[in-house]
Image (cartoon, rainbow, N blue to C red):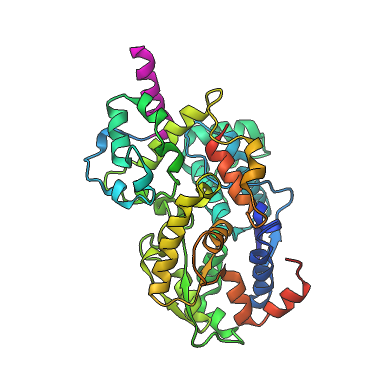
Amino acid sequence: MKYSYYPGCTLRTKAKKLDAYARASAKVLGFEMEEIENWQCCGGVYPLSGDEIASKLSSVRALNEAKVKGQELVTLCSACYHVVKRVNDDMRNVEDIRLRANNYMKLDEPYLGETEVLHFLEVLRDRIGFDEVKKKVVKPLTGRKIGAYYGCLLLRPSEILGFDNPENPTVMENLIRALGAEPVIYPYRNECCGGYISLKDKELSKNMCDTVMNSAESFEAEMLITACPLCQYNLTKNAQSDVPVIYFTELLAEALGVKEEVDANGSF
Amino acid sequence: MEASKKSRSEMVKEISGTNPLKCMKCGKCSASCPSYEKMDIKPHQFVSYVINEDVESLAKCDSLWVCLSCFACVERCPRDVKPGKIVDAARQIVIREKGGSYLVPDEIPELIDEDMPQQLLVSAFRKFRR
């Protein structure tokens, strides 16, 4: 199976690990991620203003490219997933945005939201299946207690993203189980870490990160996994905690037995 | 003066695409907000300011810069008022005006560290300036 793949700005720079471990794992699991050509940064945050078009166009270009190839579009970064999927929803359901974006783009055929946007976790859950993932595990993470950190961008607004139950998500916990470890379910796993606010107001972000990490520690998580480079940065840098926060793809690659190979070849 | 006040309130409703009149003041948005303590005007109060057409106060408040757009209030609002979109619309009105930016490129060298992901910078620029 071949998917179109939208890496996004950070996966080419500070979050190379998120990308490299995913590609190696995909190979083991029998699917390929074909990077779309000439992709542009999604902007990191979805433009909430109903009257903005220009800031949505990079997503439309990526979506249309996947459509032309007849492939589903996969992302790894929570922010890319959030932005591209919400723009896709606009192209499907908001007449004004669809019309103006298409007028500007002048594509051979108008883009009407045909592409299906999937997060890598959804590919594992809905296309491969966690039972199949489990079968490919060669180094089960037995005895490890791992917490999933979802944050905000993957889950909300659930009406549009439809990723998981926004208040009681299960996808990453089921992944952790499939890899042989024990998921730690703690209350703050779907609360915001402070995100972009950490640039101008580090104290506020620190408070939020401490709340999340204290919550995870009190439920005895030894490690957290996330899909968001900004969460990974914030929770690692701005919380007073020794609990490591890594990308979910690193854990996956470890259990599938390809982590060392990636580490040997990668320049992180 | 009255007319311009009114038009700004209309602008907030237009940009956000929400109907503040649906709010029943349950306060779930403010109870869910991770930035609540740092907000001078709370999420549920934002809705009231728009109803009362006092966007001038919103344009001057600190809450504009501490809202994270985490959508906790949007997700949990039982009346689909989407307070986060109202905050963002008020922020847009401020940053779209000349000199309204909350972040200027010259500040960046002092704010960054070597581990900071690009995602943080592009997000902050989207949120804080035009």
Residue B17 as seen in the image, left or right of residue A61: left
**Residue at left offset 39%, top offset 33%:** B61
Q: Which residues are magenta?
A: B1-17
Query: Looking at the picture, does residue A147 appear above or below residue B43?
Result: below
Does A184 sit left or right of B113 as displayed?
left
Q: Is residue B51 magenta?
A: no
One can see residue A88 in this view: yes
Magenta stretch mostly in which secondary structure?
helix
Residue A238, percent across and down?
52, 59
Nearer to us in this view, B88 or A240: A240
Identify whether B104 is placed above or below A250: above
Q: Identify the residue at horizontal 22%, vertical 41% (top origin).
A: B25
Q: Residue B81, image x and y in percent? A: 32, 40
Quadrant including the N terminus of chain B:
top left
Please provide percent x and percent y for residue A82: 52, 52
Choose between A218 and A177: the one closer to the eye.
A218
* Screen quadrant of the C terminus of chain B: top right
Q: Quadrant of residue A133?
A: bottom right
- Quadrant for residue B57, please give it: top left
